[in-house]
Amino acid sequence: MTALRLAARRSAGHRGFSTCSPSQTALPFLLRNSRSAAAADPDSGSDSSHHPNGRALRMIMFGKPGAGKGTLTARLVQKYDILSLSTGDLLRQHIAEKTEVGRVAEEIVAKGGLLPDELMLKVVSSKLDALRHKHWILDGFPRTVGQGRLLDAHLRKQCSPLNLVVNLDVPDEVILTRISDRWVHLPSGRVYNLSYNRPRVDGLDDKTGEPLTKRPDDNPETFTRRLQQFYASTSPLLQYYSSSPSTNSPGPKAKLVSLRGSTSDEIWPLLEHALAWPSETALGCGGTASFAASDVLQS
């Protein structure tokens, strides 16, 4: 079951069954590089977002609250031909368009109920099934091991298995300091931080001069609760994606890559390194890896 509700906050930077044999090789993540490069050959007749070797990047990213997941996802979307898909946005779209899935979901949400995993899979797969030759990042699903198994099974049936799972490994104390120093301009959503991104005038938005405020949940008590929830739900998922394929979960698992750092600027080159990393050679199927800044500098 998932606790996703209609009133869930819209994530920043987001927009709005067949069979095949499992692939026996892992996928090297060699993106076409950038939107400008893809657009440079409009008459080629090829899908500009298609992976050069015929494979597409299918990715999910995990991170503690405040780890920078939204910031890094937005950078990927801006630089590369990658679509970012928010489960919350997809659900709201289904409800607004009165689809069959949307009508069922709206009724459950109106009663204060929880959406079954199978229904959430339909919400997600309705979009993913049309993106088999596109690079994408999925946000908000899966949140449990059961949802992970459902997603894996569906994507394998579509011959488009998940191939990269990224875990942002930011120390708890770093995030706590970050959210304690964070101020926002609510009308625009602009975020400032007294540690590394101060406003030009303390307490005022750079563009409008209007007062900055604290988010209600930017406090140690709320952060501690959210962190506990993260560990309870995400740790089993990370363990699931790091395990080897079995008779109960056939086919190759996605690569799990842990990126260690304290800021989004520090993690960004690690993330790009992971995307371009020849995973088949380094790990084989179902492998895991960890990257820190020193790994990239030495490579």
Image (cartoon, rainbow, N blue to C red):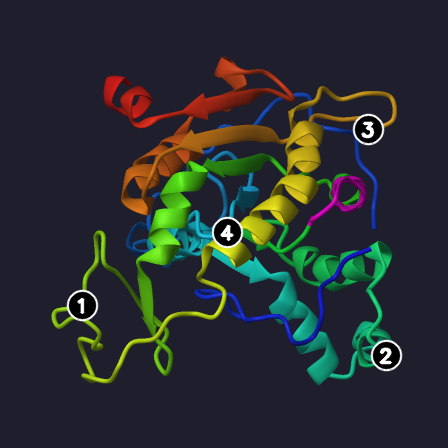
Q: Earlier in the sequence, mark 4 or mark 3?
A: 4
Q: Are marks 4 and 3 in contact (CB under 8 Å)?
A: no
Q: Position of residue 136 (x, y in %)?
A: 54, 51
User: Is 147 in the magenta?
Assistant: yes
Q: Nearer the viewer, residue 23 or 121?
A: 121
Which residue has dot 3 on it? 249
Q: Are marks 4 and 1 in contact (CB under 8 Å)?
A: no
Front position among marks 3 and 2: 2
Q: Is residue 240 above or below residue 76?
A: above
User: Is 77 in the magenta?
Assistant: no
Q: Amino acid at mark 4?
A: Pro
Q: Amino acid at mark 1?
A: Pro
Which residue has dot 1 on it? 199
Which residue has dot 2 on it? 111
- Secondary element under disc 4, as helix, strand or loop, is loop
In three-dimensional space, the C-alpha distance between marks 4 and 1, rounded to whole angstroms, equals 23 Å
Q: Earlier in the sequence, mark 1 or mark 2?
A: 2
Q: Are marks 1 and 2 in contact (CB under 8 Å)?
A: no
Q: Quadrant of residue 30?
A: top left
Which portion, as a residue range, is magenta? 142-153
Q: Nearer the viewer, residue 203 or 277?
A: 203
